[in-house]
Image (spheres, helix red, strand yellow):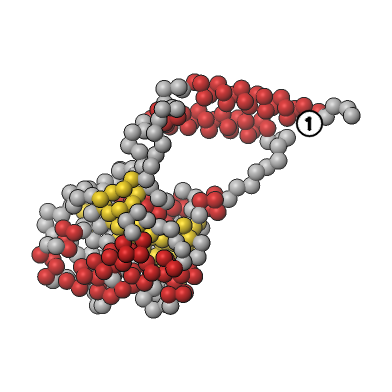
């Protein structure tokens, strides 16, 4: 048959695209992140001493040897090239529909409208994950509280009202169906009524239900061993006992290779309107965003073990 102008244009476009891509790949050969001799990032197993500090500017990328500047330049060049390719070829190629949330998976955050949980939900949505926040509060209350903490609404988070202390294990498991990870920020503050079961039993049930649902990974926000073994244990024994029970359950259900337990001492600040007692003298507060970032790193599989 006769020639097809559209096919000819498509062929020419793809040849130009290949040339641009090849030129870009050759332009920055010194970047170790794309070198044939580079080591691919692996999961970091953390078993940290109590002296480890989580800093607000600390990044958990799984490989400290990569040069951020080099990688940024490389990725910028590549993204620019692909943008040119997409713009040039778009009239002739069928569109590719992509759902970033579906492709990356679902993460369930218990206590997702709390101080750490809201920040974790925000980071997860920014990375393209589908996020479900579960709390005893109504979805409307969770949304409002999250907005008060973050200063903006997370309209793309699915808020569910469910009491982890009273719901059946089957209902808890159903809430985590198809989840790739669970983060539990659930717990009662020191001195609260029923603080032992409110920290221990509730999180033990979450861990059991997550295991039954086939969730691959779990992250739990515990408490620093330095505090748990210090003088405060004589005043807040039930609180620390509950936290220890939760940590033991997480490890029992998931082991050290499929879980991350984060044990901060004092988290700086708090939700608007909430007054929290000061920490012990000499104990440095940890920024909430650092704790949230560590939790997200555990949920996506970049960190495992214990950060104490």
| Tally of numbered discs | 1
The percent position of residue 179, horizontal first and vertical second, equals 48, 60
Q: Is residue 111 visible?
A: no
Mark 1: secondary structure: helix
Quadrant location of the C terminus in the rendered image = bottom left
| Front one among 122 and 273 | 122
The correct choice, above or below, for 81 with respect to 204 in the image is above
Q: Is residue 212 visible?
A: yes
The correct choice, above or below, for 135 with respect to 223 in the image is below
In the image, what residue occupies the spot 67% across and 24% down?
15
The percent position of residue 128, horizontal first and vertical second, equals 49, 50
The percent position of residue 30, horizontal first and vertical second, equals 41, 22
Judged left or right of residue 144, residue 85 is: right
Identify the residue under disc 1. Answer: 6
State which quadrant residue 258 falls in. bottom left
In the image, what residue occupies the spot 81% across and 28% down?
5
State which quadrant residue 295 falls in. bottom left
The correct choice, above or below, for 89 with respect to 267 in the image is above
The percent position of residue 74, horizontal first and vertical second, equals 46, 29
| Front one among 139 and 252 | 252
């Amino acid at each position: 048959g006769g020639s097809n102008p559209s096919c000819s244009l498509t062929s020419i476009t793809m040849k130009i695209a290949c040339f641009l891509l090849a030129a870009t790949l050759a332009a920055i050969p010194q970047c170790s992140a794309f070198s044939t001799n580079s080591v691919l990032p692996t999961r970091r197993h953390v078993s940290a001493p109590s002296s480890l500090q989580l800093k607000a500017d600390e990044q958990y990328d799984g490989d400290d040897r990569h040069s951020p500047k080099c990688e940024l330049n490389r990725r910028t060049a590549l993204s620019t090239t692909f943008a040119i390719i997409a713009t040039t070829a778009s009239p002739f190629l069928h569109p590719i529909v992509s759902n970033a949330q579906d492709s990356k998976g679902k993460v369930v955050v218990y206590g997702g409208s709390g101080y750490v949980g809201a920040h974790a939900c925000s980071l997860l949505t920014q990375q393209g994950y589908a996020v479900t926040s579960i709390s005893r509060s109504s979805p409307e209350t969770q949304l409002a509280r999250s907005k008060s903490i973050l200063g903006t609404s997370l309209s793309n988070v699915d808020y569910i009202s469910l009491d982890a202390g009273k719901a059946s294990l089957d209902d808890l498991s159903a809430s985590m169906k198809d989840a790739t990870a669970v983060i539990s920020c659930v717990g009662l503050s020191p001195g609260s009524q029923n603080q032992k079961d409110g920290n221990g039993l509730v999180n033990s049930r979450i861990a059991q239900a997550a295991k039954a649902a086939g969730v691959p990974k779990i992250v739990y926000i515990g408490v620093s061993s330095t505090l748990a073994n210090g003088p405060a244990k004589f005043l807040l024994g039930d609180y620390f006992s509950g936290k220890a029970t939760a940590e033991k359950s997480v490890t029992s259900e998931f082991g050290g290779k499929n879980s991350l337990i984060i044990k901060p001492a004092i988290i700086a600040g708090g939700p608007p309107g909430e007054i929290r007692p000061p920490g012990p003298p000499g104990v440095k507060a940890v920024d909430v965003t650092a704790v949230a970032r560590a939790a997200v790193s555990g949920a996506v599989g970049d960190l495992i073990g214990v950060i104490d």
